Amino acid sequence: MERAARVRGADIVQHPLVGKCDGATGDAAPVQARGSSGPDMRDRSGSARRRGRFHGCGFVRGPDVKKGSPRVAFFPCVYHEVDGVAQTSRHFEAFARRQQTDFFMVHAGPRDEVVANGTVTRVELPRSPVKFPLDRAHDYDLLFLRHYRKVEPMLRDFRPDVVQITGPSDVGTLGAYVAYKLNIPLAATWQTNLHQYARRRMAAATAFLPNAAAGQLADVAARLSFRATARFYKIPRLLFAPNQEMIRVLKTATGKPCYLMSHAVDTMVFRPELRDRDGGPFRIGYVGRLTTEKSVRSLARLEQRLLEKGYRDFEFVVVGEGAEQEWLRNNMRQAEFTGVLTGPDLWRTFANFDVLAFPSETDTFGLVVLEAFASGVPAVVTDLGGPQDTVRQGRTGFIARDFDEFVSYTQRIMDEPALLASMRAAAREQALETSWDRIFAGMYEAYERCLCSVPVESRSVLDVATT
């Protein structure tokens, strides 16, 4: 299993989770809130600095954030797509609707429409023909900023206290630009290790070169990509990251406060009771995009190694699509490829796995691991990226330091029914420990810390994911 380059930062400590946010009294103050007194909002070039309407910290902490909560304008990179970031975006919208908080969302899609539902307004904007694919499921529109003229007056009317983006996409760039022009504090989540994607894609593109030369080019691509991405993440006032490693890296690279934003799953739909197979071959599952950066060729190597060791009564079920799909079909003998699954089909498929094999070294979190846990399925993951922070070694799965360990851990789960049974129960129990409501309530609490002057003294729900 090819190991991705690590970004150094092991000596950096996590930003403290109590007290004022660094830079909380900086220049980028919130737009004056609707209904408050004072002059009308003007653009950055002529406006006086003002504090937000919740500067007095009337924010209610805990899962119920309705009263006095900040007004959030959310610009997610993806919404309709089938991936973890899109799922998180939809869960954030659903949370705001349940809590009846003022929430304004802008995302890309096939339609040009505005949908208002209670306290939530969702704006969908089409991409232009001047776009290029980042992969089979994601595009970047070079002209997406043309929508500024439409979004700017809507945001003026909404009067957000914070603009939240999910990365340097075309939508995220629009959100950052609007926040700058209207003098609204900007927050950003780190969702994708773009530098590791760059490294893997460069390695694939230069595979014809000698290993040393190809490796050097891949390292350069990763270094330059991270440098460019880190410069973008210096713009927001506060950051969120899905794992402790990226919190350390971002804190040292940007100097900005960075909070843990964990993930959750709907344990009412991902559940072990949906399993409808008894016996049969041991089923090794994979769910995700079939792309180079996901290290999916390791699935074929895993199959080959198991066959070499004499295992025959097993099968792979591979869920997803991508550029590596044809290669996998041609190089795996005991695998079923389902394509993209959603809804009940996906939930049942998860429940019918015996183990999830997730060889990715670039995922910042790996939501599918938590979906597997909710379904009562343990996971084998690598020691690079976010999934290692989710798996509890020896209890809900295994964290492999190299490919040989990945194979041996898979074998161990196959060979020890009692271990598999205990891991099934522990995985389900772990998935039940948190919820999207607690996670998003933690984000609102972080907004308060960084946008108001009164320190938070109580223990934060942000700490839940690390205890």
Image (cartoon, rainbow, N blue to C red):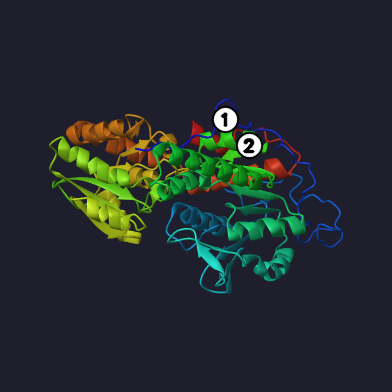
Residue 425: tell me if it is visible: yes
State the quadrant of the N terminus: top left
Alpha-carbon distance for marks 2 and 1? 9 Å
Q: Nearer the viewer, residue 63 or 272?
A: 272
Q: Position of residue 112 (x, y in %)?
A: 57, 74
Q: Which residue is mark 2?
A: 253
Q: Are marks 2 and 1 in contact (CB under 8 Å)?
A: yes
Residue sitting nearer the eye, 267 or 284: 284
Residue 442 in view (yes/no): no
* Residue 9 marker: 1
Label 1, residues with CA under 10 Å away: few <14, some 14-19, many ≥20: some
Looking at the image, residue 369 lies above or below residue 105: above
Residue 440: mark: none
The image quadrant that residue 419 belongs to is: top left
Q: Disc 2 residue type?
A: Ala
Amino acid, disc 1: Gly
From the viewer's perspective, tell me whether residue 96 is left or right of residue 30. left
SS category of the residue bearing label 1 = loop
Seen at 26% across and 42% down, the residue is 301
Whether residue 324 sits left or right of residue 434 in the image: it is left
The reply, left or right, for residue 152 in relation to residue 415 is right
Mark found first going from the N terminus, 2 or 1: 1
Tell me which corner region of the image, top left, top right, bottom left or bottom right, holds residue 421: top left
Of the pair 459 and 282, the residue shown nearer to us = 282
Which residue is drawn at the image coordinates 60% and 62% (left, top)?
105
